Amino acid sequence: MTSITHILRYPEGDEKEIEQSLNFNQIIDLNGRPISTPIPSPKMIIYRVFRVSTKEERGEVIKYYYLELIVGEELLGLAR
């Protein structure tokens, strides 16, 4: 049996395990939950998945989701 682990990699270098799978270019909140647009407030901390990689070992698959922080005009654009 193969287990699948999903790991968020934040820009600061921190990592966090999450339950669900994410997609490339998906917008998520600080805790890794997907967010639909328009976002409720331009004061939220949100990230975009800019890279996905997979590491396979015997009996285990680890999916890494690399995140970039969304700021400035792009963040305001998502709130409209």
Image (cartoon, rainbow, N blue to C red):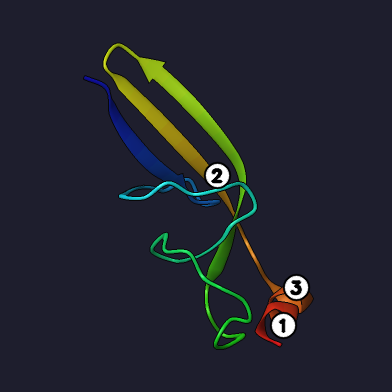
Q: CA distance from mark 2 to mark 3?
A: 19 Å
Q: Which residue is mark 1?
A: 76
Whether tag 3 and tag 1 are in contact, CB under 8 A, the answer is yes
Q: Quadrant of the N terminus?
A: top left
Say above or below: 10 vs 56: below
The tag on residue 11 is none
SS of the residue under disc 2 = strand
Say above or below: 71 vs 15: below
Q: CA distance from mark 1 to mark 2?
A: 22 Å
Q: Which residue is mark 3?
A: 74
Crowding around mark 3 (Cα neighbors within 10 Å: few <14, some 14 to 19, many 20+) is few
Asked whether, in this view, residue 59 is left or right of residue 61, the answer is left
The image position of residue 76, as x and y in percent, is 72, 83
Q: Which residue is mark 2?
A: 66
Q: Nearer the viewer, residue 42 or 23?
A: 23
The image position of residue 42, as x and y in percent, is 62, 85
Amino acid carrying mark 3 in the image: Glu
- Which residue: 39% across, 42% down? 7
The answer to which of marks 1 and 2 sits earlier in the sequence is 2
Amino acid carrying mark 1 in the image: Leu
Crowding around mark 2 (Cα neighbors within 10 Å: few <14, some 14 to 19, many 20+) is many
Crowding around mark 1 (Cα neighbors within 10 Å: few <14, some 14 to 19, many 20+) is some
The image position of residue 19, as x and y in percent, is 30, 50
- Which residue: 75% across, 80% down? 77
- Which residue: 56% across, 37% down? 52
- Which residue: 44% across, 34% down? 63
SS of the residue under disc 1 = helix
In which quarter of the view is residue 70 placed? Answer: bottom right
Asked whether, in this view, residue 4 is left or right of residue 34, the answer is left
The image position of residue 49, as x and y in percent, is 59, 51
Q: CA distance from mark 3 to mark 1?
A: 5 Å
The answer to which of marks 2 and 3 sits earlier in the sequence is 2
